[in-house]
Image (tube, rainbow, N blue to C red):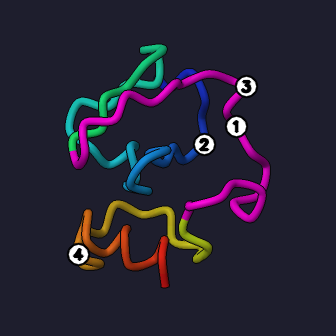
Amino acid sequence: MLRFPNVTWWCDSCGANLNCQEGFDDHKYVWKCTECGYKNSISKDNIFVEQGNYPGVPSDDDDSCDDSDGGFLGGLFRRFF
């Protein structure tokens, strides 16, 4: 059971979807991104109601774990272009 149901966690560094990473557990207070190695804080203080309020997060509405976007490189593309 998730501590924060219906919350999608994104890496603060590379924009990867943390929820899709193997072993992800939001009961941990810090999660090391498997894409870039950045240590992300997992707490209620880091929950944003809308993605537009947080810089670097993909603006599309797709919170799925479909990796067809290219994973890390896809995240960088969405972040910078």
Give the number of the mark in front: 3 or 2. 3
Image coords of residue 75 (percent x, y): 37, 68
Mark 1–mark 2 CB contact (< 8 Å): yes
Mark closest to the chain's N terminus, 3 or 2 = 2
On the rendered structure, is 11 left or right of 24?
Answer: right
| Highlighted magenta segment, given as a residue range | 35-57
Residue at 60% x, 29% y is 4
| Location of mark 1 (residue) | 47
> What amino acid is at disc 2?
Val
Please report the residue visible at 79 percent of the width from the left and 49 percent of the height from the top. Answer: 49
Nearest-to-viewer mark from 1 and 2 = 1
The residue tagged 3 is: 45
Residue 32 located left or right of residue 78: left
Local packing at callout 2 (Cα closer than 10 Å; few below 14, some 14-19, many 20+) is: some
- Residue under the point 29% across and 78% down: 69
Instruction: Describe residue 64's horizontal placement relative to residue 61 as left or right.
Output: left
Separation of disc 4 and disc 2 at Cα? Answer: 22 Å
Q: Magenta: predominant secondary structure element? A: loop
Q: Which residue is mark 4?
A: 70
Q: Is residue 55 magenta?
A: yes
Could you tell which of marks 1 and 2 lies nearer the N-terminus?
2
Q: Secondary structure at mark 4?
A: loop
Residue 56 part of the magenta segment = yes
Q: Examine the image and state in which quarter residue 65 appears.
A: bottom left
How many angstroms separate mark 3 from mark 1 (CA)?
Answer: 6 Å
Q: Earlier in the sequence, mark 4 or mark 2?
A: 2
Give the CA distance from mark 1 to mark 2: 8 Å
Which amino acid type is shown beneath numbered disc 4? Gly
